[in-house]
Image (cartoon, helix red, strand yellow):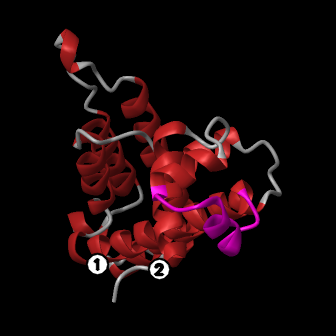
Amino acid sequence: MPPSRREDLIDAAERVFRREGFRSPSVDRVIQEAGVSRMTLYNHFKGKDDLAVAAVRRSSERAIERLAEHLGRAGTLGLFDLLRDAVDDAAFQGCLFQRAADEIDDVCAPARRVVTRHRRAMVALIAETLANEGFPAEVLGELAEDLLTVYDGALVRAQIEGGCPEHDEAPADAAGRARLLAERLLSAAGSPIDR
């Protein structure tokens, strides 16, 4: 079954917001990207804010599904393999969630609340993976938060120091450094993997 116009609009909004941010592009930019009429957009969404919520929610659903699958196969350190795959991709344009948190000023805005729920879901998945690996219950929450902080820092660093192929600049190995730091955190927490 072909995707609906609503789905086309969400996909287009996700691409536009990822590429251009949340502040500058207009609804017209999303309409153009989706190849639909203004009436079609307003039949499905009230405006740009609703589109932002739908785009961030869709991106979160996909990211959490991918993260759960990957952590289930690769374990906690698989978080940093996913990070490496993302930042090494030539199409990498930064993190949609960090961009939303940075550019949507109102912390109570619906799209910002989706970002917050996304982050909580990431912490929960990391903690669940740590539990499955045998880490004690008393360290799960804090250790999961620490690992997400390392991940976030590496993501920002990769975005800032992404390198420029036109000037022979190599991107920083932020994901590799983050993985090493994560290994140290796990070891300091008494990693059952090392026993």
Give the structural element (helix, strand or loop) at label 2: loop
- Give the residues drawn in magenta, as a range: 34-47
Q: Residue at x 16, y 13 (%)?
A: 168
Residue 69's place in the image compared with 51, above or below, is below
Left or right side of 162 for 136 = right
Question: Residue 99's image quarter?
Answer: top right
User: In this view of the protein, which residue sits in the foreground, 44 or 11?
Assistant: 44
Q: Which residue is mark 2?
A: 4
Q: Is residue 45 magenta?
A: yes
Residue 96 visible within the image: no
Q: Nearer the viewer, mark 2 or mark 1?
A: 2
Crowd rating for badge 1 (residues with CA inside 10 Å; few <14, some 14–19, many 20+):
some
Q: Which residue is mark 1?
A: 72
Q: Report, in whole angstroms, how far the alpha carbon at label 2 lies from the one at label 1.
A: 32 Å
Quadrant location of the C terminus in the rendered image: bottom left
Q: Position of residue 79 (x, y in %)?
A: 33, 59
Q: Residue furthest left?
A: 168
